[in-house]
Image: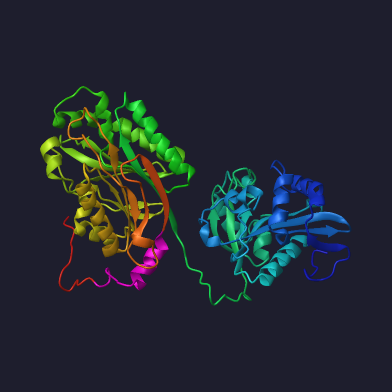
Amino acid sequence: MAHEHPDAPLEGVVIRQVRMEDYDALTALQHKCFPGMKPWSREQLASQLETFPEGQICLEYKGTLVASSSSVILDFELYAEKHTWHEVADSGFIRNHTAEGNTLYGLEIMVDPAFRGMRFARRLYEARKQLARRRNLMRIVLGGRLPGYAQHADRMSAREYVDRVLRKELVDPVLTTQISNGFVLKRMIQSYLDADKESLGWATMLEWSNLDFQPDPHRRYLPYKRVRICVVQYQMRPIKGFDDFARQCEYFVDVASDYKSDFILFPEIFTLQLLSFMPPERPGLAVRRLAQFTPQYVDLFRTLAVRHDVNIVAGSHFTVEDDGRLYNTAHLFHRNGGVDRQHKLHITPNERRWWGVEPGREHKVFDTDKGKVSIQVCYDVEFPELGRLAAEAGAQIFFVPFCTDERYGYLRVRYCAQARCVENHVYVAMAGTVGNLPDVENMDIQYAQSGIFTPSDIPFTRDAIAAECTPNVETVVIDDVDLELLKRHRQSGSVLNWHDRRTDLYDVVLKR
């Protein structure tokens, strides 16, 4: 039996669609195959059969249900490379099934342990392939468990374990079977299904390509790299202590996290709100006292970034360096716990006169888990040379925390931000403060209309505005930008500002 050809007839084998009356048999099978893991609920199975019955199949042997397979059709480009099982499976309900999608995603396959060795899994994989051919799908993708890994985890990493399985030095009940059925390993995924203790949450992403796939001549499949940005239009109001400030900030970070944002952007010098509960002083002395809160500010946002799994551009905050110089400093808190800083490079006459701020001396571009970004604090974005240097260093998103007192100042920042999009084929997100702080000198009034801006061309949104806030109210906007679209636009836009620079006549050089 072990050497039987997978297509050979075997008496008593029936492959058919799952029915609701199979629920008890499927539950028993899941308990045998995945001990300790929660089986499908009746509601989940009912949703699967209502949404995509063709993708839910089972195998009977001599009248007994001994194997089953569950799958869903997706537009796979919409899912992150490091997706989780709950994301692609809609937590088992598959309401995200897309009949016009291009990928059959295998959610689960199981064979009763008493019947393994009879190539029932191969028959289910072949049934999936037939479904992909029948539906003219580009591929089948699997998030494969590694149920043998826990037994070896004390001696090797998950990557080493997979390498040894591929070299046939070890046998994994799932991966070995998938490779033998023509699937190709593409990458590994951590925290794919944390409830899977046998795999310690690890999975492999595997793919089978449908060689019979016929592309729709009216449909193009283009790479897509989504980055979700949340911009906070923050209201300056008197508070009673640092805890009030922290509570307000965590509220916005929690909102961004609930909407699965990759970045949240706060405004420039919004920590001046802390002066509202401190004794009045001359402005230059007051902001130096404000700098004493730097350790609390850093601890707060580092904790929030990790806890809520979002990168935080925490506006800017006045800091005093060891040499006693005062800087207007933007901070980037990575969701892995890292912290980066960018001093404001161009200081306005107002900042010099009221606070004695010094200009920074180093321009940086930061690596993040969503690509390279630049932080240009307010006035910085009004100098096109800085945008050129950032784009040349690979930045695709410019973050602009700003603080402006009236509409003329705001429009200077906004018009320049939109110009940087056109010049450099980048996205710019800008966040400003609104409201007022009556007892804090030089912060009497605020004007802002924060937003996310794009290059001005056909592939992007009308007016080159991805999203914008209502003026002068506390709110957020959240939107997605596509980094792959930027790359294509730089090569094939209506105008090619980046390529058409006359570098034979002029150039921009960063002095070291």
Q: Residue furthest top?
A: 279
Q: Quadrant of the C terminus?
A: bottom left
Residue drawn 21% across the image and 34% down it: 444
Q: Is residue 224 left or right of residue 442?
A: right
Determine the residue positioned at 22% across, 47% down: 407
Image coordinates for residue 334, horizontal then vertical, percent: 38, 44
Quadrant in which residue 126 is drawn: bottom right
83 is higher (above) or lower (below) than 245: below
Question: Which of 387/117 is in front?
Answer: 387
Residue 445 position within the rendered picture, expressed as x and y whole percent measured from the top left = 22, 37
Q: Let me know if residue 488 is in the magenta part.
A: yes
Q: Nearer the viewer, residue 439 or 421?
A: 439
Q: Closer to the camera, 411 or 359? A: 411
Task: Please state if 65 lies on the left or on the right of 80 as rendered.
Answer: right
The colour style of the image is rainbow
Using residue 331 as the reference point, say whether residue 149 is left or right of it. right
Q: Can I make out residue 40 in this image?
A: no
Nearer to the camera, 6 or 23: 23
Residue 379 visible from this viewpoint = yes
Q: Which residues are magenta?
A: 482-500
| Image position, residue 18 (x, y; %) | 78, 56
Q: Is residue 70 above or below residue 319?
A: below
* Apparent side of residue 183 relative to residue 465 in the rendered image (left or right): right
Q: Residue at x 50, y 55 (%)?
A: 80
**How many numbered tags mark residues here?**
0
Q: Quadrant of residue 463?
A: bottom left
The image quadrant of residue 53 is bottom right
Residue 280 lies in the magenta-colored region? no
Could you say where residue 1 lies in the image, as x and y percent from the top left? 83, 64
